[in-house]
Image (cartoon, helix red, strand yellow):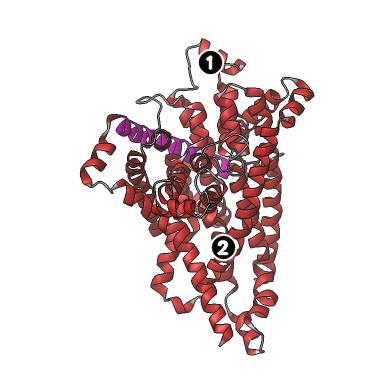
């Protein structure tokens, strides 16, 4: 009897912890965002600067995700298929953006491309200003989300049966055709899952972006930095309203991913 | 084709990861060894690392404990019903989808100075927001899925047969856990711990919002980097960031080891 009581209270404690820590805060944001009714919520969200920030974030995150889809596919392919010096080293390096604090990632890019480095100066002299401009935001997003596509594709590439490819070649298919008809379909779930993950992470990114974006309202101010600005200027309602939009978008992405690809993609 | 793609991948890694890292390392040594040492002699820098350390320890301990328990509940808790568990399982991933800034905002909205809970704690002399408790909560929120997502699949994989055998032989639940379940999930838990340490050490957005970034009080190592950059004090920012990057590399090595052990375990048992 005593043991059952202990077990029951332990279970309740775990569920309570879960509810208080995860579910309650999410409700708090929705509650605050909509607390004054629909009208103020709509006003906060359709504020020109808020709209600009949201739109800019979606565009740049999409671009970063697509770049990562290309870079990640190539990287995963080379790391799995080819044997070359430094392969294991590069393979461990893939996870570095996960392990590195995002603020440090942002600082690194700022130092490399900023006005004080030779690379930044060279690029500026030929008319390419990167730091404090949208390209820098995309670079930061690509850096932070780099591991997603690679890590989602690697297991699929390893499981790929070489016999299928060989059969395709035997039947006279070219390399390009084999890639398109045999390899790509097998990789597609991992590629889509990884790209969606990268997209949702890029939408939410703050630390790496805030240091190098310049955060000019209407031009280089992304949604998460906009929310931060609203919190800093004691405007939690507007912050919550924009958060509601961003959160809803992220949740939709998350549930789409879970529905489409099951557990394996979300890590 | 083959050579070209290998070259391209090296280029990607160089441009995206190695060059920025190298530039930062060089920047930290701009004033030589002395400049580097001066930064770490500052009391506010030491304090920031101390705060980060405290958060890492508390968050890792709590997240490990509750993460393993929740994973057990989600996988083994048949009394909960399939639907409830599926729903809870989907909820676990929520923090992944939440921007860190929003994670911090949540804590402020729940426990801030003008809220019911905030005033309640304030009247009992506990300051939640702009103080350590809020920062710990924000970090706990952000790191929440890491442990559950490492342990739950392992529990699923090992199945219940061995545990049931232990029960049949008269072992108590506690003993079954330590003798049967724990050895199979051990490396998964360690992997989760390393992930949690990495994330709680590196957490920036949520902590920045909740902490208010008060020097010598609630400033962490990452928010210190942010403040030094804002003040254009790049030598200090670089030095602290380099120390954090060094810790990240250590964490990465830890992850590699844990992953290898986890896989060895998996292959041995299958």
- Residue B107 image offset from top left, x and y in percent: 45, 49
Q: Residue at x 41, y 74 (%)?
A: B82
Pick the residue in front: B163 or B62.
B62
Q: Nearer the viewer, residue A201 or B231?
A: B231
**Residue at 52% over, 48% down:** B127
Which residue is denoted by mark 2 in the rendering?
A: B67
* The C terminus of chain B: image quadrant: bottom right
Q: Dot 2 surroundings within 10 Å: few (below 14), some, or many (20 or more)?
A: many
The answer to if A251 sits in the magenta stretch is no
Q: Residues within 10 Å of mark 1 (few under 14, many from 20)?
A: some
Q: Secondary structure at mark 2?
A: helix
Chain that bears disc 1 = A
The number of callouts visible is 2
Work out whether B55 lies above or below B8: below
Task: Calculate the distance from the C-alpha at mark 1 to the C-alpha at mark 2.
Answer: 47 Å
Asked whether the residues under the numbered discs 1 and 2 touch, taking CB atoms below 8 Å apart as contact, a structural biologist would say no
* A182 and B189: which is toward the camera: B189
Magenta span: helix, strand or loop, mainly?
A: helix
- Frontmost residue, B80 versus B40: B40
Q: Quadrant of residue B6?
A: top right
Q: Chain of mark 2?
A: B
Using residue A2 as the reference point, say whether residue A196 is left or right of it.
Answer: left
Task: Tell me where residue A19 sits by quadrant.
Answer: bottom left
Q: Point out the frontmost of discs 1 and 2.
A: 2
Q: Residue B193 placed where, x, y %?
A: 64, 56
Q: Residue furthest top?
A: A125
Whether residue B162 is visible: yes
Identify the residue position indicated by label 1 in the image: A123
The x and y percentages for residue B1 are: 58, 35
Q: Is residue A54 magenta?
A: yes
* Spot occupied by residue B130 in the image (x, y as percentages of width and height): 52, 42
């Amino acid at each position: 009897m005593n043991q059952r009581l202990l077990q029951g209270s332990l279970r309740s404690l775990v569920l309570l912890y879960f509810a208080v820590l995860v579910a309650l805060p999410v409700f708090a944001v929705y509650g605050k965002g909509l607390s004054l009714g629909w009208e103020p919520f709509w006003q906060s969200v359709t504020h020109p600067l808020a709209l600009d920030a949201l739109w800019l974030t979606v565009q740049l995150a999409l671009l970063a995700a697509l770049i990562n889809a290309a870079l990640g596919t190539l990287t995963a392919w080379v790391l799995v298929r080819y044997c070359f010096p430094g392969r294991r080293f590069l393979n461990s390096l893939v996870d570095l953006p996960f392990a590195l604090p995002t603020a440090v990632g942002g600082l690194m890019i700022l130092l490399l491309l900023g006005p004080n480095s030779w690379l930044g100066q060279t690029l500026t002299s030929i008319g390419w200003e990167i730091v404090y401009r949208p390209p820098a935001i995309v670079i930061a997003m690509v850096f932070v989300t780099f591991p997603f596509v690679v890590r989602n594709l690697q297991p699929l590439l390893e499981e790929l049966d070489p016999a299928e490819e060989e059969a395709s070649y035997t039947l006279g298919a070219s390399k390009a055709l084999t890639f398109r008809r045999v390899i790509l379909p097998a990789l597609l779930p991992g590629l889509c899952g990884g790209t969606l993950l990268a997209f949702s992470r890029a939408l939410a990114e703050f630390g790496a972006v805030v240091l190098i974006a310049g955060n000019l309202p209407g031009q280089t101010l992304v949604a998460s930095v906009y929310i931060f600005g609203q919190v800093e200027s004691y405007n939690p309602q507007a912050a919550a309203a924009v958060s509601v939009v961003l959160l809803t978008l992220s949740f939709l992405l998350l549930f789409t991913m879970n529905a489409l690809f099951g557990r394996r993609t979300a890590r | 084709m083959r050579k070209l793609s290998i070259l391209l991948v090296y280029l990607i890694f160089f441009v995206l990861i190695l060059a920025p890292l190298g530039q930062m390392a060089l920047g930290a040594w701009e004033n030589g060894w002395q400049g580097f040492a001066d930064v770490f002699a500052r009391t506010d820098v030491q304090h920031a690392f101390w705060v980060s350390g405290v958060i890492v320890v508390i968050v890792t301990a709590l997240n490990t404990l509750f993460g393993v328990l929740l994973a057990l509940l989600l996988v083994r808790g048949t009394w909960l019903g399939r639907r409830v568990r599926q729903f809870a399982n989907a909820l676990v991933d929520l923090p992944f989808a939440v921007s860190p800034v929003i994670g911090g905002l949540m804590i402020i909205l729940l426990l801030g100075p003008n809220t019911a809970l905030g005033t309640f704690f304030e009247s009992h002399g506990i300051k939640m927001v702009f103080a350590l408790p809020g920062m710990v909560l924000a970090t706990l929120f952000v790191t929440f899925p890491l442990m559950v997502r490492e342990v739950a699949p392992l529990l699923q994989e090992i199945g219940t047969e061995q545990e049931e055998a232990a029960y049949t032989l008269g072992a108590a639940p506690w003993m079954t856990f330590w003798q049967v379940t724990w050895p199979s999930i051990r490396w998964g838990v360690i992997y989760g711990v390393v992930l949690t340490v990495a994330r709680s050490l590196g957490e920036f957005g949520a902590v920045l919002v909740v902490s208010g970034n008060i020097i010598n009080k609630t400033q962490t190592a990452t928010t210190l980097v942010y403040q030094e950059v804002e003040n254009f004090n790049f030598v200090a920012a670089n030095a602290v960031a380099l120390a954090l990057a060094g810790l990240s590399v250590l964490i990465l090595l830890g992850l590699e080891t844990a992953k290898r052990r986890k896989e060895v375990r998996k292959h041995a048992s299958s």
